[in-house]
Structures are given as structure tokens and as C-alpha cells.
Image (cartoon, grey):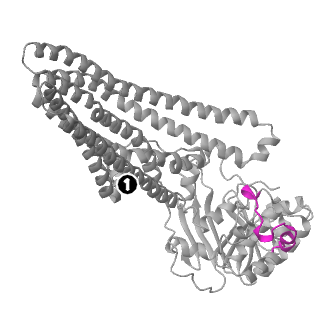
Amino acid sequence: MTKKEPEQPAHERPTAQRPAQERLSAAETWRALYRYFRPHRWVVALGALCTLIGAATGLAQPLAAKALVDRLGSDDSIAGIILLLTALVVIGTAIESVGAYVLERTAESVVLAARRTLIGRLLRLRVPEVERTQPGDLMSRITSDTTLLRAVTTQSVVSAVAGGLTFIATIVMMGLMDVVLLSVTLGVIVLIGGAVALVMPKIAQSTERAQEAVGTISTALERAFGAFRTLKASGAEARETAAVQAAAQEAWRHGVRSAKWQAVAWSSVGFAVQVSFLAVLGIGGARVASGAISVSTLVAFLLFLFYLIDPVSRLVEGVSQYQVGSAAIARIVRAERLETEDVTEPDRRPERTGPAAVAFEDVTFRYREGLPYVHHGVSFDIPGPGMTAFVGPSGAGKTTVFGLLERFYDATGGRVLVDGRDVHEWPLAELRSVIGYVEQDAPVLAGTLRENLLFGAPGATGDEIQDVLVRARLDTLVDRLPDGLETLVGHRGSQLSGGERQRVAIARALLRKPRLLLLDEATSQLDAVNELALRDVVAEVSQEVTVLVVAHRLSTVTLADRIVVMDAGRVRASGTHDELVAADPLYGELAATQFLATPA
């Protein structure tokens, strides 16, 4: 099996670089929050109104209790007041329940919208961005981070607003009853509230680190399941298990730290109310004894004090949820800032106008700043149709030619032309619609065989599918599969052999009816019989299509119309097989080692 050419040292590949983890400012966080919140602002306002109405019915209860205590000392009936208290409790609970449902439903809608936006954006990322970011971490942005977004976009906002307004209303009512007792209460709350404010940033920091650890778990699992047979064959289960468990332990550690600070915040609320109660009970009792206030006033004030637990709790909950959600928002915003491609589908597929012409004009390229150049002034001209092969030692830059044609990467210098037009001038979707590409790894996606064949040409007919099955030598495979084209091929095509996966990839590219066909080691895993058959298919296709082939096995390209020999990022020679054997020492050596020429 031919290995993928390592055009960069492993330690310098873009995947080794992680995106910068810059923190968002408060203003940026609020702008991002409002962007998710804005489409649902009126529904959230309705939920907040229900919450406030429920809170208002609660505020009326201490006043009704005061009236009840006052009547206990007289002969007046208390039945009406008891009925009023009961009605306030029932109505308040019902309205708050409606508000809670509205907010929860809206929160789910916010999460859905965020996931749709992220999915659409992440699948349009440029290839270098994906190579710089761990796939598992990107997946965690869509799953766990958007789940945390639920709390901050509705619960946090509504809890903070409703709690703040209710807190103010409660304080006003308490002040109307007795300013001295209110001063005692506020003094205790402010003192303990300052301590809570110091805790909140720690919650955000711990939550963000916990979410990053969750992303690491996803990355580690994706790595393990992506090479599951290699993992088994290498006896690496214990080591990979330890790696995943270490990431899980890290997530647990930061999650526990966040929970610890949240517990401190919540317990501070209860502690503040209890201390306030004791202080108000002592001072209030003295004021009742002195005749400054009545017993009913003290009872109502104590009820307001206990009722103050709810708005203060809402405020703490809102701020706490905001700290948790802001960490998720920061990670989501960073994902949204990754560079994407404009792959808007054209209104219609361009009419087929014959084979494409390809040219490189003094092209230079490197993957990023600071890395060595992969191409050093590569130039060639391929008019088409016909088959052109690119050969040379590993690391010569052959596969990079295909990456530049597909605009997976942009050339650092020079020009890449298709049909005499710079690839940067082509609409990206239109450019790729004329290209069929078979990668070296020949990826097959989970799903049915039919879904894989139609992946690049969803509108293909049954006759067209049958034709490519015969041409790619897949018809016998389909005949022996239990469900034919509807057979599931497993994760990454695990139910197929390497050669079968390559034939599926070739059939998928042919079904696309491209004007330019790129084959990167497309027959490296085929046996000699199937390789010969597919070589004939490629030769047939090259009569009408421009075919570019990267090959280490020269047996697949000896009949190519032209062969381009690359070495160290440069084109050193081009010609037919016989011309190059005679004229180019490097090609002659490659041919001799594969018994396709007599050693010089």
C-alpha cells in the first residue's frame, strides 16, 4: 500500500497548530448574545412578562398577611383575606408556569438556530482552517457549547431582568414599611453580594476550560475510532483509553471547580438572607417593644425578607448562567471567525464544453508563514484532452498540484489556470463542478453504497449509475452484496476492502461527468487485474476528458500522453515514458526499480 506523500514534516503540519484562544470582551459577548436573542425578543418579552406577573402576585402576599394579622385582633372576618391569599398563590403559580414553558421553548429554538448556523459554517471552512483545528473540538462547538447557549440566551436574561425588577419592587415595599429595618437588610446583602461578585469570573473561567476539555475528549475519541483496526492491531487500547480518560478527568476537574464556585454563590445568598433575618428579628423586636412599629409590620417585613430570596436567587442565577454561557459564546464566536469558502451553488450547472485545459505559471506555495516552500516556481501547460501523469519521489509536491487546482489552498505566487482563467476568477462552486477528484485515501462515507455513488452527482439516473458500476468494475461487487446498492458500507467504508473503496471513489468521480479528472494514487490498492482494467477505463475517459494522475506505481502511467517529473517542488522534465527513460536519470531510476526499464 502506497503511503501518502509527506509534503511537510509531521511536526510542522498545520494540524499541529491550535487556534488562538483569545478571550472576548464583555461588549463582544453581549453583541453575540443579542444576535442569538434578537429573533426571539418578543417571545422572550412575553415569558418575562409572565414571570413578572407571577412575581407581582408574590409581592402582594406579605401585604395580605399583614392585613390578616391586623384583623386577628378584631372581630372582622378573615375568610376573604384567606381566599385572596389562595387565589394569589394559584394564579401566580399558573402564570409563572406558562412563562417558564415559553422561555424553555424559545431556548430550544435558540439552540436549533445556533446549531444550524454553525453546521452550515463549519462545513464551508477552508481546508487550512480544518487542518489547524482538531475535528473533535469543532464537533463539541455544535453539541455541548450550543447546549450551554440555551441558558444564557433566555434564562440568564429573563432571570436577571425579572430578578432585578422584583428586587427593586421588594426593596421599595420594605422601605415603605420601615427604613431602619431596610437599612439593616441592605447592609448585610451588600456585604455578602460583594463576595459573590468576586466569584462570578471564576465560574466563567472554569466552565470554558471544562468545555475545552470536552472538545479534547471528542478529538481523542474521533482519533481512536478513525483508526480502530490499527488501534486493535497495535494493542493500544489501554493507552488510548488512558488518553481519553485523562481528558475526561480534566473536564471533571474544571466542572467540579465551576460547581464549587456556583455553590459558593448560591450558599452566599442563603447566608445573606439568614443573617438579615436574625438582624431584622432582633432589631425589629426591639422596635416593636418600643412601639415604633406594629407586630403586623414586623411580620410583613419578615415575609418580604423571605420573599427577597427569590429575586436575589434569580439575579445570582442570571449572572451565574451568564458566566457559564459566556464561555460557550466565546468558543462559538471563535468558530464563527474561522475563514470559510464561498461555495454558493450556481443557479445551474455549466454546460459541458469539452475537456479543460490546465496550466501552472511559475507557481510557488507553502502551507503557512514560517514553513518551507512546497513548490518553487512550478510551470507546465496541459491543453487536454488526454492523460497527464505526475511522478517523482515522495514530498515532491505532486498532490499539492491537485490541492491548488481545487483551491483547497491558494498559491503563494504565480498563477494556476483552468481554461486560461485564473482559478481565483472562477466562482468556487462552478470551478469544482467541472472537476472530479479521487483522493489518495479514497474516503467512503457511512451510509449505503448508492448514497456514496450519488454523493457528487445526486441527480444521476439509474442507467448512469449502472454504466459507472460496469466501468469501475463494481457490478460484480453489487451483485454479491446482500442488499445491492442499498447495502450499508459501514463507518468510513469499513465493510469494503481497500481496493473496493478505491473503485467506489473512482465510480463516484466518473458519475460526476467532469471535464477535469484528478486521480491521486487511485489504483494503489488494486490487484493487477483490476488495475489493468481501470487503466483501460481511464485511457478511454481521457479521450474526452483531461485526466491528471499522481502515481508512484509507474505501471499505471506508462501509456500516458505526457508525464511530468517533479522533484523537490520543481518540474525537472516532461515527456512520454520512453523519452523520459532515455533522457531523465531520476525517471529512469524510478522505472528501473519497478522493472519498467533497464538500469542505466
Side of 16 where 175 appears, left or right: left
To which residue does mark 1 refer?
36
Along the viewing direction, whichever of 93 and 438 lies nearer the viewer:
93
Left or right: where 145 falls relative to 460: left
| Residue 490 located within the stretch drawn in magenta | yes
The magenta region covers 472-493
Question: In the rendered view, would you say 121 is above or below 434?
Answer: above
Q: Secondary structure at mark 1?
A: helix
Residue 580 sits in which quadrant? bottom right
357 lies left or right of 577: left
* Above or below, comparing residue 368 to residue 482 in the picture: above
Left or right relative to 328: residue 246: right
Identify the residue shown where x is 43% and y is 56%. 109
Residue 351 x, y percent position in the rendering: 59, 86
Q: Is residue 14 magenta?
A: no
Q: Residue at x 76, y 68 (%)?
A: 486
Residue 578 in view: no
Neighbourhood count class around disc 1 (C-alpha, 10 Å): few under 14, some 14–19, many 20 upward = some
Query: Tag 1: residue type?
Result: Tyr
Establish if 242 lies above or below 422.
Answer: above
Question: Which percent across, then down, holds residue 209?
Answer: 49, 35
